[in-house]
Amino acid sequence: MKNSKPLILVTNDDGISAPGIRALIAVMSEIGTVVVVAPDSPQSATGHSITINDTLYINKISKENEAILEYSCSGTPVDCVKLAVNEILKKKPDLCVSGINHGSNSSINVIYSGTMSAAVEAGIEGIPAIGFSLLDYDWNADFEPIKSFIKTITLEVLAKGLPENVVLNVNFPKLKEEEIRGIKICRQAKALWIEKFDKRKTPQGRDYYWLTGEFINQDHGEDTDEWALANNFISVVPVQFDLTAHHTIQQLNTWNWNEQKSK
């Protein structure tokens, strides 16, 4: 009998043993057939990096529940998706979900996020994809209050699909389930990090640095992910991976790019 359940690829950037991905696996197991391919160690803030100057290893992890196949990967979140699609899975998954990230991936953080880069890589492969993040950096964060919302969002995407070349960036406020006011479709807030480097010295006298910084939200719009999260909503931002600034093409075409050639 043909299995009618959707095939769901689960990955993350906090590593295969992180509580966030274990919570996500539990939700996805209620929806479809789950295959997990995730980094064997934390890969936060790796962005869309891939491994090209080192070897990659995959280890199948034996689990009591054989219905769930799990693999750890020595590479980045993007490596995990590439290996899953090209080496592990016999067919393209119906959905890729990444997370649940321990910490925010709202606003400009999406650029640095390994969680979202995995989702974007799946989108590039033509796979509907969602990145999930909870605004709680604690390793022992409570993911129970958001599980029902994750299930709702996932089922909607499976039922209706996503626009071409678009993935979803979903961020949850750190609240009890009854305190969450609902799901809000948003745009990415205009914000940035003001970085500082904490300079120190080794016992041998060599300088080294720790990156620190302050997150500055420059956007006061009430249609942004930052506003939604601050007002107890779940933010859902549709993310495109075509980085072309289409609105500037007409303006740039008025410049004298070929003036030197015509002389």
Image (cartoon, grey):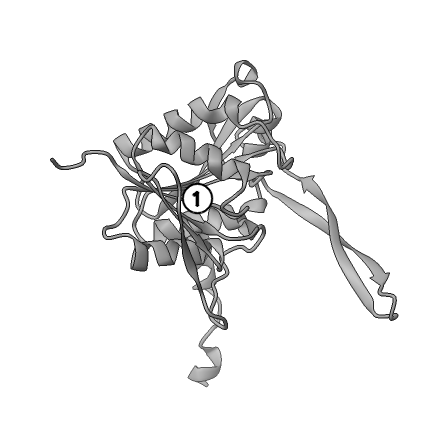
Percent of width and height locating residue 69: 34, 45
Is the residue marked by circle 1 packed among few (<14), some (14-19), or many (20+) residues within 10 Å? some
Of residues 62 and 28, the one nearer the viewer is 62
Left or right, 16 with respect to 175, comes to: left
Residue named by callout 1: 239
Residue 205 visible in the picture = yes
Q: Tell me if 47 is positioned left or right of 72 in this view.
A: right
Identity of the residue furthest to the bottom in this view: 263
Residue sitting at x 32%, y 40%: 66
Residue 78 is situated, as x and y percent measured from the top left of the image, at: 44, 56
Which element carries disc 1, helix, strand or loop?
strand
Q: Residue at x 60, y 31 (%)?
A: 141
Q: Nearer the viewer, residue 227 or 219?
A: 227
Residue found at x 38% / y 25%: 152
Residue 167 lies in what quarter of the image? top left
Q: Nearer the viewer, residue 250 or 115?
A: 115
Q: Is residue 245 visible?
A: no
Q: Name the spot of residue 257 as percent of width and height, x first.
A: 47, 73
Residue 146, compared with residue 87, is above or below; it is above
Considering every residue shown, the one lying at the far left of the view is 1
Q: Is residue 68 left or right of residue 233?
A: left
- Count of marks placed on residues: 1
**Is residue 236 positioned above or below 215 on the image?**
above
Asked where in the image residue 174 lies, by quadrant, the reply is top right
Residue kind at label 1, given as amino acid type: Val
Location of the N terminus by quadrant is: top left
Above or below residue 184? Residue 14 is below
Q: Considering depth in this image, is 149 or 43 the residue closer to the camera?
A: 43
- Percent across and percent down for residue 235 are 50, 30
In the picture provided, is 217 more to the left or to the right than 229?
right
